[in-house]
Amino acid sequence: MADLTTTAKILALTFLVASMLSLGMQTRLSELRSLVESRSFLVRTLVANFVLAPMLGIALLLPLEPHTAGALVLLACTPGGLSAIQFTSQVKGGAASSVAVMFLLALLAIFISPPLLKLVLPAKVPMVIPYGSALLFFMVFLLVPLLVGMLLLGKAPGAA
């Protein structure tokens, strides 16, 4: 029998793949393209997630214990994640906005979050960023299920 950690990982990955597949089955490529071309939407999304959230996280650090502060700054500087699927579905535009925001934040977080964290974490905290593994994870668990869902929507809309 698998231990709890392995079971939790399998369930989290299953949720992620199923969510991205589901979002792909609700979203056409043309909808994504129009959202990505919306400069004001992209700028507001990036500023909110990569500027305002870290600033708020850092501002809230003052009265907190070190372990709590560390967790908060980590969350503030790394947007996206599994919970972003749930929250981005509330964005105006429905599934297409969810896909665009989730996809964009997950991809950019791989490259933007490490420098943000270096700015706010103590210098003695070592940071090793496995960029190859992060990009592989992104492609296997986000991009592929999304594209499969979109392909299914295009080829068999009734099944999607």
Image: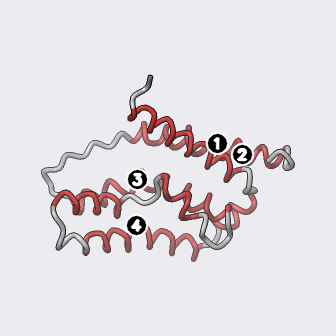
Q: Which residue is mark 1?
A: 145
Mark 4, mark 1: which one is toward the viewer? 1
Marks 3 and 4, how far apart in space? 11 Å
Q: Nearer the viewer, residue 1 or 127?
A: 1
Marks 3 and 1, how far apart in space? 22 Å
Q: How is the image coloured?
A: secondary structure
Is the C-beta separation of discs 2 and 1 under 8 Å?
A: yes
Mark 3, mark 2: which one is toward the viewer? 2
Amino acid type, callout 2:
Gly
Q: Which residue is mark 2?
A: 149
Q: Residue at x 26, y 70 (%)?
A: 58
Mark 3, mark 4: which one is toward the viewer? 4
Amino acid type, callout 1:
Pro
Q: Earlier in the sequence, mark 4 or mark 1?
A: 4
Quadrant hosting residue 2: top left
At mark 4, the secondary structure is helix
Q: Which residue is mark 3?
A: 111
Q: Position of residue 71 (x, y in %)?
A: 27, 57
At mark 3, the secondary structure is helix
Q: Earlier in the sequence, mark 3 or mark 2?
A: 3
Q: Residue at x 60, y 45 (%)?
A: 143
Q: Is residue 106 left or right of residue 66?
A: right
Q: Nearer the viewer, residue 32 or 158?
A: 158
Amino acid type, callout 4:
Phe
Q: Position of residue 80 (x, y in %)?
A: 47, 57
Q: Earlier in the sequence, mark 3 or mark 4?
A: 4
At mark 1, the secondary structure is helix
Q: Nearer the viewer, residue 16 or 108?
A: 16
Q: Which residue is mark 4?
A: 50
Marks 3 and 2, how far apart in space? 26 Å
Amino acid type, callout 3:
Phe
Mark 2 Cα-neighbour bin, 10 Å: few <14, some 14–19, many ≥20: many
